[in-house]
Amino acid sequence: MELGSKEWKKLITDGAGVMGIQLSGSETDQFALHGIELLHWTRKINLTTITDPYEIGVKHFLDSIAPVPMIPRGVSILDIGSGGGFPGIPLKILIPSLTVTLIDASRKKVSFLKHVIRTLQLENIDAFHIRAEDLANSPPENSDPFNRPFDVIISRALAALDKFITLALPLLAKDGVIIALKGNVNATEIESVRLRVKKTSYRTGVNKGNFSLLVKEYVLPYLGLERSLVRLRI
């Protein structure tokens, strides 16, 4: 299967349909262009270890759009550790009203992200070479390019769930949402998150006991991989 072919686009469209998400032809065209650039750049820099077009379609693109029903329209969203642009760029394609900020600790990956943004002619989205820890610790200034605090903070690259929550909390807006795309999540990890939220003092005057935690399990089409969406609403 060739990335960007009719067969590949049908794979994406049908798979999204199984997930309850309807894609237009222009959206799958943009996914294809993103994927083609991903493969091209991966020959030069380490963007992804997944190079099979079939797996790129399922493991990168279909997995990235799973949170679409959880994300309000017109909000600001931060993608921590965006890497090859997942999930931030596919989410921007499907929800154009989002204001998206992509950050990554690798300068080369950020160069790729900026290239894809230009290639796809996306607006209200930018990529920055910065670590989440540094962003959280830097005070906002009048010339600050970051649209913080963020309404939604998301990641699918960080391994430790409680670490991601800790990074995200200082950057989250009031009534904001944190979403983690994970594999199987066990009860110990969830309890660790609950304790971390209760103990973390991230914003003066906020009742840290007033939060909701949702775990939504799903299966990636075709490959049958079990995945989880962890949503923390503050």
Image (spheres, helix red, strand yellow):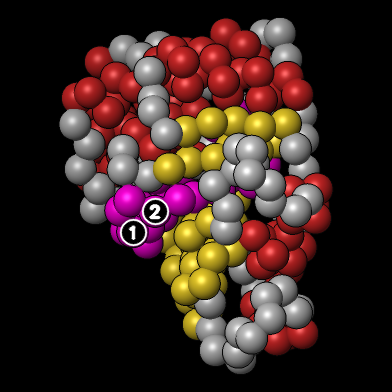
In the rendering, at what x and y percent does residue 77 appear?
49, 50
Q: Amino acid at mark 1?
A: Pro
Outermost residue, front direction?
142
Chain part drawn in magenta: 61-85
- As rendered, which of 114 and 1 lies closer to the eye? 114
Q: Residue 4, relative to residue 162: is it above or below? A: above
In the rendering, at what x and y percent does residue 11 appear?
30, 30
Depth check, mark 1 against mark 2: the one in front is 2
Could you tell me how far apart the alpha carbons at marks 1 and 2 are, in whole angstroms?
6 Å
Q: Is residue 95 magenta?
A: no
Residue lying at 52% horizontally and 72% vertically, measured from the top left: 174
In the rendering, at what x and y percent does residue 232 appear?
54, 72
Q: In which image quadrant can residue 50 be found?
A: top right
Q: Is residue 78 magenta?
A: yes
Secondary structure beneath disc 1? loop
In the visual, does 202 lie left or right of 147? Answer: right
Q: Residue 76, relative to residue 8: is it above or below? A: below
Q: What residue is disc 2 on?
A: 75
Residue lying at 72% horizontally and 31% vertically, measured from the top left: 129
Q: Quadrant of the N terminus?
A: top left
Q: Amino acid at mark 2?
A: Val
In the visual, does 218 lie left or right of 143? Answer: left
